[in-house]
Image: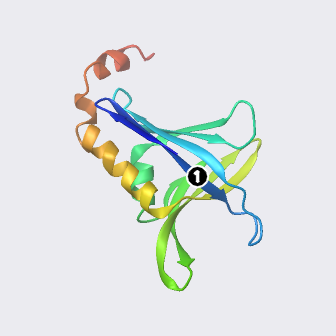
Amino acid sequence: MGQHEHLTGIERELTLRPVLSPERSVPVATLFAYRGEDPYAVHLTFHIGSVPPIRRTFARDLLVDGIFRPSGHGDVRVWPARAEAGGRPASRSPMFALTSPDGDALLRAPADPVAAWPERTLRIVPPGSEGDRPGLDDDLSQLPA
């Protein structure tokens, strides 16, 4: 899995695991994407064998908060869960709950890579400076009143 970072965005491919049952967990390739021109949102693309892949866009704050405490409601929720690792102390693995008319999914993400990824987005567009992005006012003025 790779990672691509540039001044206006960052992408990271990670493998998430569906929480189906203790004996069954099929890996799900997931692309995490953040773009400076869309500073409030993160974009996740889940490759679960469906064509086209499943895409979700939600608030960056939901992901940042969800690493430490339950966050979100509705179709995307994120929270930290304890995962035992072979007798070692438990680490926090973010859990993603996705709801749609087509079905629901509960996915466990690898703790360290998912926790590090939002930190990189905060370097591209620091918290509180999202509204300072060039062109954002132009984009907002195009919305119907």
User: Along the line of sight, which residue is nearer the eye, 142 or 92?
Assistant: 92
Where the C terminus falls, by quadrant?
Answer: top left
Q: Position of residue 100 (x, y in %)?
A: 70, 43
Q: Which residue is depicted at the point 36% across and 33% down?
A: 9
Q: Amino acid at mark 1?
A: Thr
Residue 74 against residue 137 in the figure, above or below = below
Q: Residue furthest front?
A: 1
Report if residue 24 is visible in the image: yes
Q: Which residue is depicted at the point 58% across and 52% down?
A: 15
Q: Which residue is depicted at the point 39% across and 29% down?
A: 38
Image quarter for residue 10? top left
Q: Label 1's element?
A: strand
- Residue 90 is left or right of residue 30, and the answer is left
How packed is label 1: few (under 14 Cα within 10 Å), some, or many (20 or more)?
some
Report if residue 125 is visible in the image: no
Image quarter for residue 11? top left
Image mark count: 1
Residue 67 against residue 142 in the figure, above or below = below
- Residue 141 is left or right of residue 66, and the answer is left
Q: Position of residue 74 (x, y in %)?
A: 60, 49
Residue 32 against residue 21 in the figure, above or below = above
Q: Position of residue 125 (x, y in %)?
A: 27, 38
Residue 34 against residue 69 in the figure, above or below = above
- Residue 87 is left or right of residue 22, and the answer is left
Display coloring? rainbow
- Residue 113 is left or right of residue 51, and the answer is left
Residue position for label 1: 15
Q: Which residue is depicted at the point 72% across and 62% down?
A: 25
Q: Position of residue 44 (x, y in %)?
A: 54, 40
